[in-house]
Amino acid sequence: MQQNNATKPKLADNADQAMEQLASIIASYSEITERMQSSHQKLQGEVKLLREELRHKNEMLQRKSRLAALGEMAAGVAHEIRNPLGGVQLYASLLEKELVGNEASLQWVRKIIKGVRGLDLIVNDMLTFTQDSFCDKTEVNFTALLTEVLDYARPQIRSKNTRIDITDVASNLVVNVDLNMMTRILLNLILNAVDAAGDSGNVVIKAGPHKAKDYKVFVSVSDDGCGIKPEALKKIFNPFFTTKDSGTGLGLAIVHRLIECHNGLISAINNNSGGATFTILLP
Ligand code: ADP
């Protein structure tokens, strides 16, 4: 009897201990499960990012090989056109001198000269697009660079009566860029925006430090024009894509190429309020 009484509490103690151990095993198990779940989610997030990065790199690679073939052809055509064009240019200007005093004929010759000049610009654009360009970077004050670019764009800005807002450009922003290339990039984006904004439209330029990985500076050019049709959004950086009667479709292709030379990024979106925004990220 006595023995029995002593065994009972012992059994109860053992049962309590077993329950405690079981509870602690279950707690550890759910802690481990939770940790595994969170690292699984983390891994899933990383896989998603890597997949996105891979998709982007694949797209860039495809674009590069497509452009290499197109570039080779464009360079060939540009060289073939350039020589006879030089001749036409020379003979037209000789003819212009010969015809001094003959206003009616001079008008025709001047039209030829103007047309040839336009063709020459296109040929130069084609060569710029196809040539390997060396990016000669220097540190420059962004506001000073932008002021110069706006001066170049002044005739178009005036003729369209465009309002240019640069209040959100950080005044002491320094960018490490190839001056000629960045001038061309900004001029192209601003002229496109002025064109899209139409008469008395608005163009907003913003620039400042960017905190995300790999890029130090952002520059954006927005307009309140008609925006970009969804089916065109994927094509606007392709050479020869244009929706304009007198466009060549080389401007944004060159901009894309020059931004690539800077190891930067460029993207375009439609604004919710109408119009489009082009954003550049620079290292
Ligand atoms: P181009 O000006 O000769 O057409 P671009 O390469 O500069 O060549 O532009 C390609 C096309 O991208 C334009 O024809 C136009 O359809 C579109 N685009 C460029 N900028 C804008 C903008 N700010 N708003 C709307 N569409 C634009």
Image (cartoon, helix red, strand yellow):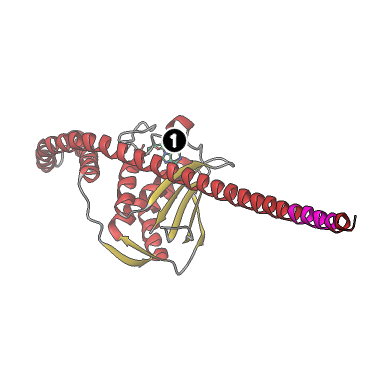
* Any part of residue 152 in sight: yes
From the image, which quarter does the N terminus lie in? bottom right
Q: Position of residue 70 (x, y in %)?
A: 23, 34
Q: Secondary structure at mark 1?
A: helix
Residue, disc 1: 233
From the image, which quarter does the C terminus lie in? bottom left
Q: Is residue 145 left or right of residue 166?
A: left
Residue 253's quadrant in the figure?
A: top left
For the residue with label 1, is its CB less than 8 Å from the closest atom of ligand 1?
Answer: no
Residue at point 25%, 61% (across, down): 136
Q: Position of residue 255 (x, y in %)?
A: 33, 47
Amino acid under disc 1 = Leu
Q: Is residue 17 a member of the stretch shown in magenta?
A: yes
Q: Quadrant of ligand 1?
A: top left
Q: Is residue 20 left or right of residue 33?
A: right
Q: Is residue 167 above or below residue 98?
A: below
The dominant secondary structure in magenta is helix
Of all residues, the one furthest to the bottom in this rendering is 172
Q: Position of residue 120 (x, y in %)?
A: 20, 41
Please state the total of marks drawn on the protein image: 1
Neighbour tally class for label 1: few under 14, some 14-19, many 20 plus, Cα within 10 Å = some
Q: 5 and 269: which one is in front? A: 5
Residue at point 63%, 50% (across, down): 34
Q: Is residue 130 left or right of residue 97?
A: right
* Any part of residue 277 in sight: no
Q: Position of residue 156 (x, y in %)?
A: 40, 48
Question: What range is drawn magenta here?
Answer: 7-18
Residue at point 56%, 40% (across, down): 274
Q: 211 and 53: which one is in front? A: 53
